[in-house]
Amino acid sequence: MNTDARLLTAQPAAPGRGRAGRPWGMLIASHTFLIFYCLLSVFPVLVVVLNSVKKPLSIFQAPFVPPTLSTFTLEGYQTLAQNANFGLYTFNSLTVTLGSLLLILLAGSAAAFALSEYQFRFSTLLSLYLSLGIMVPIRLGTPGILELAKSLHINNTLWALIAVYTAQGLPLAIFVLTAFMRQLPRDLKEAARLDGASEYRIYLLVLPLIRPAIGAILAISLIPVWNDLWFPLVLANGERTKTLVLGASMFLGQFVNDYNAVLAALTLAILPAILLYILFSRQLIRGLTDGAIK
């Protein structure tokens, strides 16, 4: 169909309805609810960040008022710098989170490609077995994981956390990516094979086609890894291997009455996770948009 035909067949929106054909009242109500929910989610984080740079008295007198020249202070962050190594904690958390996400993506996509592309004996049973990891909490295996980490001499190291979080995120990643890869046309992969492409080359060609699924997996796996306190406390509680959440929790126990320091610690623990989530969410939206255009 050419451009003129499309223009002739395009129908204008009915009076009182939006482009999607829904009534304007429903569109306004849904957008109002989404905006309200967004503000409700962002407001507590904004209050914590603003009060982290205010004097203690102004925190209680006007907790919802932005800091002014007379109430602005960095005492909380100075206390953090003097009494805790939050720079190292942040580096450890970033290393563990990004390393885990990378391994989840590589191992999960490779396993999903094999399960979706090749039919072999017990392939269905293997898929069901891997899916069980979604329903079984990995914390149930903490004693065995601790013994395994000790036998491999990786306890109290970041490698132990990366291995655990990779195992934790793989079942969901394999399940989602397998479903997406099975929806791809087989003609594309068969054409690549006829052109002489190897299986590894075909695997690399498939990855850009499932960007929405990859973005979803990264966004979903990010928050549990960053916010986890259990495994850092069990496997890597040394001063050189503390994650940001573990370091902030121990700091809050020592300075529970220093509200500036408490809010500053919470700010440093929250903001990196929000920035990483926004980054991966943008990739997810971009992938969905590209897929819709194609």
Image (tube, rainbow, N blue to C red):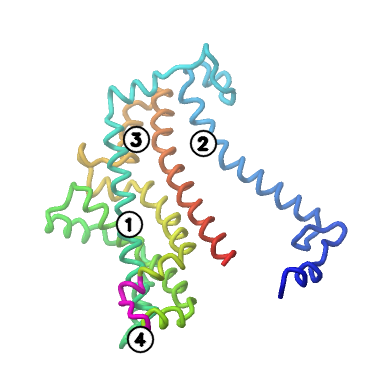
Which of labels 2 and 3 is toward the front? Answer: 2
Residue 230 is marked as none
Between disc 2 and disc 4, whose residue precedes?
2
Secondary structure found at label 2: helix
Between disc 2 and disc 3, whose residue precedes?
2
Q: The residue under label 3 is which amino acid type?
A: Ala
Residue, disc 3: 248
Q: Quadrant of residue 62?
A: top right
Label 1 environment density (alpha carbons within 10 Å; few <14, some 14–19, many ≥20): some
Q: The residue under label 1 is which amino acid type?
A: Leu
Which of labels 1 and 2 is toward the front? Answer: 1
Residue at image coords 34%, 35%: 248
| Quadrant (top left/top right/bottom left/bottom right) for the C terminus | bottom right
Secondary structure found at label 3: helix
Residue, disc 2: 45
Residue 119 is marked as 4
Residue, disc 1: 102
Q: Which residues are magenta?
A: 194-203
Between disc 4 and disc 1, whose residue precedes?
1
Residue at image coords 43%, 60%: 217
Secondary structure found at label 1: helix
